[in-house]
Image (spheres, rainbow, N blue to C red):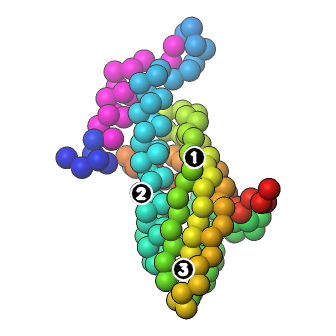
Amino acid sequence: MNNRAILSAALSFALLFCPALHAADNGALCDSTRQAVEKAVLEAHSRMTAAAQDPDPEKMFAFILDAGPGTIIQNGVYLNSRQDALEAVKKGMEGVAKVERSFKQTRVTVLASELALLTGYGTTTITLMDGRVISSPIALTELFVLRDGEWKLLHGHHSVPNRQ
């Protein structure tokens, strides 16, 4: 059984056998559901990050839903559609030999059993075809939703933070 199947089974188990609403918590999710969602979202983010390191942007965009305008905001640029974001990434990848992303910190805030917010920061390192290497910090906010048994990005806001 692969990791995705295990995570899906764990989440299904938690949703079935955990009373999602506690009267004392005024509607809060139980710990096992929250932990299962957090683990599944971190795994989806990890797979999306690995896919983003591939020269083919289509691999990363397989994790992104087409939710209309503003699905992706990149460095303050509000992109009108998933397709516009994909085209921008394809153009940005011209002349790029390698992309590496590493995250120093990621945090998941579980909003519901099928909705979670991931925030994080780290570094993106790009190696150009001519051998030059460019490294820069990255900060992100990503909203994940569970669709057809898979965690997908509904909205992403990525930026290069000011250096301090």
Question: Residue 40 or 105: which is nearer the viewer?
Answer: 105
Region rendered in magenta: 7-22
Looking at marks 1 and 2 on the same chain, the residue that comes earlier in the sequence is marked by 2
- Badge 2 element: helix
Residue 9 is covered by the magenta coloring: yes
Q: Residue at x 62, y 76 (%)?
A: 134
Whether label 3 touches label 2, CB < 8 Å: no
Q: Nearer the viewer, mark 3 or mark 2?
A: 3
Indicate whether 31 appears above or below 109. above
Q: Which SS does the magenta portion mostly show?
A: helix
Is residue 150 left or right of 64 when viewed as pictured?
A: left
Looking at marks 3 and 1 on the same chain, the residue that comes earlier in the sequence is marked by 1
Indicate whether 3 appears above or below 162. above
Is residue 90 left or right of 8 when viewed as pictured?
A: right
Q: What residue would you read off at disc 3?
A: 127
Residue 146 in percent (x, y) is at: 46, 45
Disc 3 to disc 2, how far (Cα)?
Answer: 21 Å
Residue 23 in percent (x, y) is at: 55, 10
Question: Residue 36 or 152: which is nearer the viewer?
Answer: 36
Looking at marks 3 and 2 on the same chain, the residue that comes earlier in the sequence is marked by 2
Q: Residue at x 55, y 39 (%)?
A: 108
What amino acid type is highlighted by mark number 2?
A: Arg
Q: Residues within 10 Å of mark 2 (few under 14, many from 20)?
A: some
- Badge 3 element: strand
Residue 5 in percent (x, y) is at: 27, 45
Q: Where residue 159 is drawn, which disc sits there?
A: none
Is residue 82 left or right of 7 when viewed as pictured?
A: right
Residue 133 in percent (x, y) is at: 59, 79
Q: Where residue 47 is drawn, which disc sits there?
A: 2
Rendering quarter of residue 66: bottom right
